[in-house]
């Protein structure tokens, strides 16, 4: 490659490199730096915060909120992923059949994904309202008792999980449906000739061939779900009494939700989320290489 071609290549790469440095590398560096210093409002402005080392991480691990927030994050993430993937895969297999109104129904299923999160979360808050929500109204029609979905410690976490599942299903549907379209019909014909029924074709043909697409779907869903903040904050603000607090909402509350913000511990909690997502990303890369 001559000098002019090399210069042209770097010219095309420069905007991307600059974008990554400004919007990814620098914020990540600042977050790590925040977590290693004892910042106050004054020192945050003046930039003279003393070095604290891993003291902020020690505070986070020793905080009484750590283990409940960790448990809520794990439950919120795993339950959301399991149901989003299962429902999305079932809908993708259903829409694989060509029938009238298939395209229109697929488009309607995309609505939750296209709506702004603040609209979706606000809608679910209204639906799950204890006094005037349509869910409790429907329960009363069938003789059920009203449930304090958003104000009960027993139901608050599950309420935000249900809302997040509803929002995430369309993404799984779109990605998995595209993966199903890439599977050759000849494979199904060969399986049918060998005497495989519908269930056997799914588990022996469809599911194994869909594994690469499934892996990237679950990875992207994991990274997205770990950092979900809008839905939880709008619906419950992590309450009541911390019953739906996750690492994302806890990080925000530490850094911005108190009169005396704890920037260092808040950044430390955020870094724990980043490390978790990075670990699963490296596992995915290793598995795909093997």
Image (cartoon, helix red, strand yellow):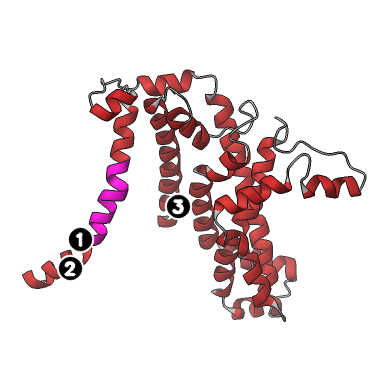
- Residue placed most toward the observer, 131 or 190: 131
The residue that mark 2 highlights is 9
Q: Residues within 10 Å of mark 1 (few under 14, many from 20)?
A: few
The residue that mark 1 highlights is 14
Quadrant in which residue 172 is drawn: bottom right
**Secondary structure category for the residue under label 1:** helix
First in sequence: mark 3 or mark 1? 1
First in sequence: mark 2 or mark 1? 2
Give percent across and percent down for residue 130. 77, 39
Q: In the image, what residue occupies the spot 42% across and 22% down? A: 260
Give the magenta part as a residue range: 14-27
Task: Please tell me the numbered disc located at residue 287.
Answer: 3
Magenta stretch encompasses residue 147: no
Magenta stretch encompasses residue 25: yes
**Secondary structure category for the residue under label 3:** helix
Quadrant where the C terminus is found in the figure: bottom left
Q: In the image, what residue occupies the spot 61% across and 64% down? A: 111
Residue 212 in view here: yes
Given this view, does label 3 or label 1 mark the residue nearer the observer?
1
Q: In the image, what residue occupies the spot 54% across and 44% down? A: 230
Q: Residues within 10 Å of mark 3 (few under 14, many from 20)?
A: few
Q: Are marks 2 and 1 in contact (CB under 8 Å)?
A: no
Give percent across and percent down for residue 239. 62, 31
Q: Is residue 246 above or below residue 207?
A: above
User: Please, which residue is most extreme toward the left here?
Assistant: 3
Q: How far apart are labels 2 and 3 at the CA level?
A: 31 Å
**Secondary structure category for the residue under label 2:** helix
């Amino acid at each position: 490659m001559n000098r002019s071609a090399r210069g042209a290549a770097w010219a095309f790469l420069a905007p991307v490199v600059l974008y990554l440095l400004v919007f990814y590398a620098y914020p990540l560096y600042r977050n790590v730096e925040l977590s290693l210093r004892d910042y106050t409002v004054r020192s945050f402005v003046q930039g003279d915060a003393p070095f604290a080392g891993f003291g902020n991480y020690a505070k986070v691990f020793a905080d009484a909120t750590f283990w409940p927030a960790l448990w809520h994050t794990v439950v919120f993430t795993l339950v959301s992923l399991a149901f989003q993937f299962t429902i999305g895969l079932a809908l993708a297999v259903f829409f694989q059949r060509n029938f009238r109104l298939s395209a229109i129904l697929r488009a309607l299923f995309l609505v939750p994904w296209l709506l702004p999160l603040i609209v979706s979360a606000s809608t679910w808050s209204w639906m799950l309202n204890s006094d005037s929500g349509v869910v409790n109204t429907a329960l009363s029609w069938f003789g059920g008792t009203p449930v304090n979905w958003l104000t009960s410690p027993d139901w608050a976490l599950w309420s935000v999980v249900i809302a997040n599942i509803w929002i995430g299903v369309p993404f799984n549907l779109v990605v998995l449906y595209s993966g199903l379209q890439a599977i050759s019909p000849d494979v199904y014909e060969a399986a049918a000739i060998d005497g495989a029924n519908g269930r056997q074709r799914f588990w022996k043909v469809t599911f194994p061939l869909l594994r690469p697409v499934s892996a990237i779907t679950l990875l992207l869903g994991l990274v997205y779900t770990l950092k979900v903040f809008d839905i939880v904050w709008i619906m419950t603000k992590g309450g009541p009494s911390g019953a739906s607090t996750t690492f994302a909402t806890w990080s925000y509350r530490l850094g911005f939700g108190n009169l005396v913000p704890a920037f260092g511990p808040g950044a430390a909690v955020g870094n724990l989320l980043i490390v978790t997502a990075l670990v699963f990303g490296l596992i995915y890369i290793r598995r795909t290489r093997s």
